[in-house]
Image: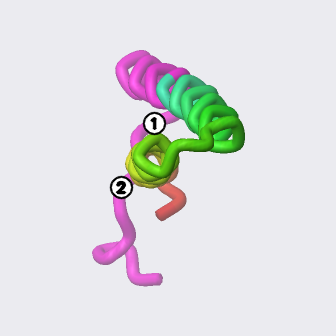
Amino acid sequence: MPQSVKKASPRRGDPAQEEARRELLQSLAHTRTLINQAYGGFNNASDSDLIESYVFEINSLQARYNYLLRRVKELEGAT
């Protein structure tokens, strides 16, 4: 890949980058926990409105998880 097109990756050990990465990883872990809880609620729900609400919640959380994962990859220079 030509050098002019390649994205510049931040230096390793950059404290600001490491802090941002750490926060993103914490958010990923928290979101993953919320997804698991939503699946648990979905599996135990019997009311159609409640089931529908869990489907929307799971989809929303998965979209957030994908966003956070993409941000981590961008930060690491692995787009």
Q: Nearer the viewer, residue 15 or 41?
A: 41
Q: What's the amino acid at mark 1?
A: Arg
Where is residue 44, by image quadrant? top right
Helix, strand or loop at label 2? It is loop
Q: Nearer the viewer, residue 26 or 15?
A: 26
Above or below, comparing residue 46 to residue 24 in the picture: below
Measuring from the top left, give residue 51's x and y in whole percent.
Answer: 51, 48
Q: Nearer the viewer, residue 54 or 13?
A: 54
Where is residue 19, by image quadrant? top left
Q: Nearer the viewer, residue 35 or 73?
A: 35
Measuring from the top left, give residue 31's x and y in whole percent.
Answer: 52, 32
Helix, strand or loop at label 1? It is loop
Q: Which mark is residue 54?
A: none
Q: Which residues are magenta?
A: 1-26
> Does the magenta-highlighted stretch encompass residue 22?
yes
Measuring from the top left, give residue 6's x and y in whole percent.
Answer: 38, 70
Count the labels in the image.
2
Label 2 CA crowd tier, 10 Å (few <14, some 14–19, many 20+): few
Measuring from the top left, give residue 4's x and y in whole percent.
Answer: 29, 74
Q: Which mark is residue 8?
A: 2
- Are discs 1 and 2 less than 8 Å apart at CB? no
Residue at (52%, 43%) from the top-left corner?
A: 47
Above or below, comparing residue 70 to residue 2 in the picture: above
Residue at the disc numbered 1? 11
Q: What's the amino acid at mark 2?
A: Ala
Residue at (45%, 36%) from the top-left corner?
A: 11
The furthest residue to the left = 4
Q: How is the image coloured?
A: rainbow
